[in-house]
């Protein structure tokens, strides 16, 4: 088995943000899109976080957390804590067959 080359944080963040911009109009409430656009410059954040082990509850299949990067896109509060999450991304490290899953804000 070959060792998996992991996405570096900047690449994972760029991929998630590009997908977010493309898919947000179809998956977010117009009010959330407006809020995001108005607040992103001041409070926006796109962060790679430790891959959660509960994605199976969201996507219906077990995943190897080491095979994926998890990126959150949202707004931070005055304490620099992301408390308004618009999307959580799960992006595979497999470059030739890049899979991703998104949990959108409801």
Image (cartoon, grey):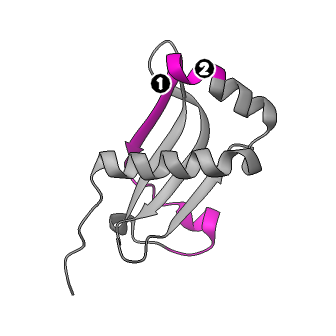
| Residue 49 highlighted magenta (yes or no) | yes
Residue 15: assigned label: none
Quarter of the image holding residue 57?
Answer: bottom right
Give residue 66's position: percent from left, percent from top. Answer: 32, 65
The residue at 63%/73% (across/down) is 60
Looking at the picture, how far across and down is residue 70, in whole percent? 43, 53
Is the residue 104 above or below the residue 85 in the image? Answer: below
Location of residue 28 by image quarter: top right
Which residue corresponds to the image point at 38% horizontal and 52% vertical from the top-left?
A: 12
**In front: mark 2 or mark 1?**
2
Outermost residue, right direction? 30
**Residue at label 2?**
39
Q: Which residues are magenta?
A: 38-62
**Can you say which quadrant of the picture contains the C terminus?**
top right
The answer to whether residue 104 is left or right of residue 4 is right
Instruction: Give left or right: position of 60 versus 15.
Output: right
- In percent of width and height, residue 65 lies at 39, 64
Question: In the rendered structure, which disc, 2 or 1, sits on the residue that comes first in sequence?
Answer: 2
Question: Badge 1 is on which residue?
Answer: 81
Q: Secondary structure at mark 2?
A: helix
Q: Residue at x 35, y 68 (%)?
A: 67
Q: Is residue 68 above or below residue 86?
A: below
Instruction: Please name the residue shown 50% across and 43% down the image.
Output: 72
Choose between 29 and 1: the one closer to the eye.
29
Q: Position of residue 22 (x, y in %)?
A: 62, 50
Element under disc 1: loop
Q: Which quarter of the figure is the N terminus placed in?
A: bottom left
- The foreground one among 95 and 60 is 95
Task: Please rate how many residues cluster around mark 1, counting C-alpha atoms within 10 Å: few if below 14, some from 14 to 19, many from 20.
Answer: few
Q: Is residue 44 above or below residue 104?
A: above
């Amino acid at each position: 088995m070959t060792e998996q080359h992991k996405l570096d944080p900047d690449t994972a963040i760029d991929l998630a943000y590009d997908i977010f911009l493309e898919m947000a109009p179809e998956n977010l409430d117009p009010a959330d899109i407006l809020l995001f656009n108005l607040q992103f410059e001041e409070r926006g954040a796109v962060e790679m976080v430790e891959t959660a082990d509960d994605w199976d509850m969201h996507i219906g299949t077990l995943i190897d957390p080491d095979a994926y990067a998890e990126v959150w896109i949202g707004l931070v509060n005055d304490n620099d804590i992301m408390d308004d999450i618009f999307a959580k991304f799960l992006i595979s490290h497999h470059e030739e067959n890049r899979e991703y899953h998104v949990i959108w804000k409801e």
